Image (spheres, rainbow, N blue to C red):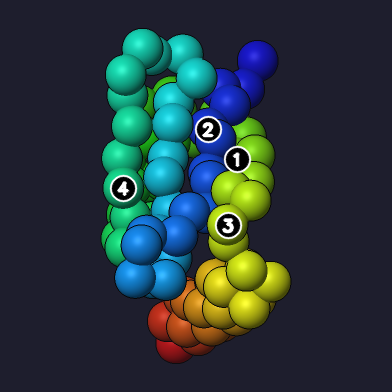
Amino acid sequence: MSVIINSTIKSNPLGRWYIELNDTTKDNHMAICLDVYEYAIKIEEIGAEYGGDIDVVWSAEDNVTPEQINEVRMQMNAYEMEREAKINQ
């Protein structure tokens, strides 16, 4: 059975988004990621603890704008393309 990792997009008082990761199997196991690169590293670290058997559940707080969600999505897509290009070299 996969471990569920909650990834919540949040916004700070200055309007800058960040991603909060919560491991649902551990109490008070939370990480803050300020960009998608940091997020990728943290997800890989958490995934390694469980042999890669994780499911990521995304959500966003109410104060996160559609533009911020789109920015995260676009950065994640760019990261994936960059990662695939490195693998295919």
For the residues labelled 2 and 4, the Cα–Cα distance comes to 13 Å
Look at the image and tell me in which quarter the N terminus lies: top right
- Nearer the observer: mark 1 or 4; the answer is 4
- Nearer the observer: mark 2 or 4; the answer is 4
Q: Amino acid at mark 2?
A: Ile
For the residues labelled 3 and 4, the Cα–Cα distance comes to 17 Å
Q: Is residue 84 left or right of residue 66?
A: left
Q: How many numbered markers are drawn? A: 4
Q: Determine the secondary structure under disc 2.
A: strand
For the residues labelled 3 and 1, the Cα–Cα distance comes to 21 Å
Q: CB of mark 2 within 8 Å of CB of mark 1?
A: yes
Q: Is residue 29 left or right of residue 15?
A: left
Q: Amino acid at mark 4?
A: Ile
Q: Mark number for residue 5?
A: 2
Q: Is residue 66 left or right of residue 34?
A: right
Q: Amino acid at mark 1?
A: Val
Q: Mark number for residue 17?
A: none
| Residue wearing tag 4 | 32
Q: Mark number for residue 63?
A: 3
Q: CB of mark 3 within 8 Å of CB of mark 4?
A: no
For the residues labelled 3 and 2, the Cα–Cα distance comes to 21 Å
Q: Mark number for residue 56?
A: 1
The picture places residue 15, in percent across and down from the top left corner, at 42, 71
Q: Determine the secondary structure under disc 1.
A: strand
- Nearer the observer: mark 3 or 4; the answer is 3
Q: Amino acid at mark 3?
A: Asn
Measuring 45% from the left and 60% from the top, which residue is drawn there? 11
The picture places residue 22, in percent across and down from the top left corner, at 44, 31
